[in-house]
Amino acid sequence: MVIVVNEQPHKLFKRKGADLLIEKEITLLESLTGCDFAIDYLDGTSFRIQSKPGQVIKPDSLMTIEDKGLPFHKNSYKFGNLFVLFQIKFPETLDEMKRNKIASTLSSMKKNKPDADMDVEETVMLQEYKEEHKNSHV
């Protein structure tokens, strides 16, 4: 007897051996103050995932939850790990009151405080990237 197993992609989990990976989008607030969410596992159970108090999650951080992967082949009492890849959703804009509040709260972290009397020739503004900004000239 030959049994063929055809693995189908899952909407939440990606598999590599006994390890699993999920991608989770969290807000900037959650990345700075802590995240707390639940996931539905493959076997129908669900569990809660929390960050440690005071832990800051940076964009593209990869975190591990030990023993929450799949069972190892021929060693079903031992499990792989679950990895969580975090994407941070930043706000599109901030009004002046929110900017001032955030600046006040995070002012101790500011490294390079701009000088009003900096000796520069020009001030330029950043803008969102567009494909037509690429130079096609060699």
Image (cartoon, rainbow, N blue to C red):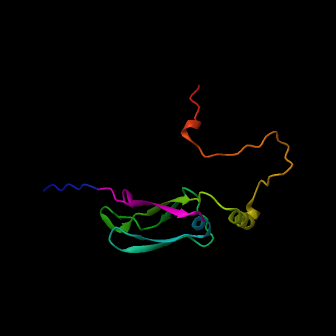
Tell me where the magenta segment starts and ends, as one range.
8-28
Q: Between 16 and 56, which is closer to the camera in this rendering?
A: 56
Q: Magenta stretch: residue 42 in it? A: no
Q: Is residue 9 left or right of residue 59?
A: left
Q: In which quarter of the image is the N terminus?
A: bottom left
> At 40% from the left edge and 60% from the top edge, which residue is drawn?
19
- Classify 52 as above or below 92: below
Tell me the quarter of the picture where residue 38 sits: bottom left
Q: Percent position (x, y) of residue 97?
A: 71, 66
> At 34% from the left edge and 67% from the top edge, which residue is drawn?
42
- Classify 100 as above or below 134: below
> At 49% from the left edge and 63% from the top edge, which residue is drawn?
64
Q: In which quarter of the image is the C terminus?
A: top right
Q: In this view, does 14 lie to the left or right of 100?
A: left
Q: Between 96 and 123, which is closer to the camera in this rendering?
A: 96
Q: Percent position (x, y) of residue 94?
A: 65, 61
